[in-house]
Image (spheres, rainbow, N blue to C red):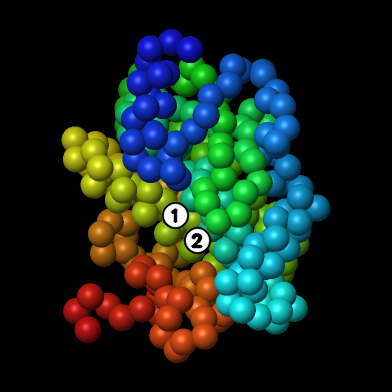
Amino acid sequence: MNSAAEFLLAELAALGPFFSVYAHLPGERPEMPWLSVDELSRPEPMRRRIAEIGLALAAAAGTQAEQIDMRVAASTAHFGIVARLLSPALAALASGYELSTQPAELWWQEVLGAPSPLSVPVPPHRLDDRQPSAATACGKLVSELIEPVTSTVAEVVPMSFRVLWGNVASAVNSACLRIATKRPAAADCAQLLSEIVFAAPQLRTERSPSGPGFRRSSCCLIYRISAERGKGICGDCVLSRSPSS
């Protein structure tokens, strides 16, 4: 691994567990328990993942698995996956590097209760012209990596694409805010990246612009399994009170 790749991996790790990644050489196939991210675009692996999340949610709520709305489990699984895939990719772009967006080149491990380990091929591609290249990279990130996962979730558990793409918008905004907070010198770039992704056709229904005041126009549904009224509502949820209220 070259010094630039080592520096980038250290930068990603410093941002937190949703950004930290392992590395493998291009074309390398890590051994078990590593699984190809490509599996997340297939119904059976996704159905298994959603079922596992449903069991975990039931255990946390102290209820039976059959009492968990599978749309809640699907949304929760989807949110965790897209946040894990988007966060390091956006942070790398903010540093001038492009990670692979090819699912077959990315590897992950199935874990519950923490961000799944993720491995990316190195060395990453260096962006030559930050803004146009970043726009192209963000387009590939959405179309090649996030859209297949999102479509598979909707295939396995019929639910609103507005909810699922709202998850994506929330994950993008949260990742870019984290980058801006932890690396102030990259704040403008992180904001630009969020705006580029928000301009994708799938996210244009979001009424709120990206940034600290972002509020998604749909709900991730997690409130439906909360035992207390008003709990289980995220800060950027459409159901939450506005900052001025």
Which one is in front, 56 or 177?
56
Mark 2 — residue? 167
Q: Are marks 1 and 2 in contact (CB under 8 Å)?
A: yes
Q: Is 181 left or right of 218, judged from the image as shown?
A: left
Real-space CA distance between mark 1 and mark 2, rounded to the nearest whole angstrom: 6 Å
Label 1: state its secondary structure.
helix
> Residue 226 location, x and y as percent?
52, 81
Mark carried by residue 55: none
> Residue 46 location, x and y as percent?
72, 54
Label 2: state its secondary structure.
helix
Mark carried by residue 171: 1
Q: Is residue 65 above or below residue 19?
A: below
Residue 140 visible (yes or no): yes
Which one is in front, 172 or 160?
172
Residue 188 visible (yes or no): no
Q: Is 132 left or right of 201, judged from the image as shown?
A: left
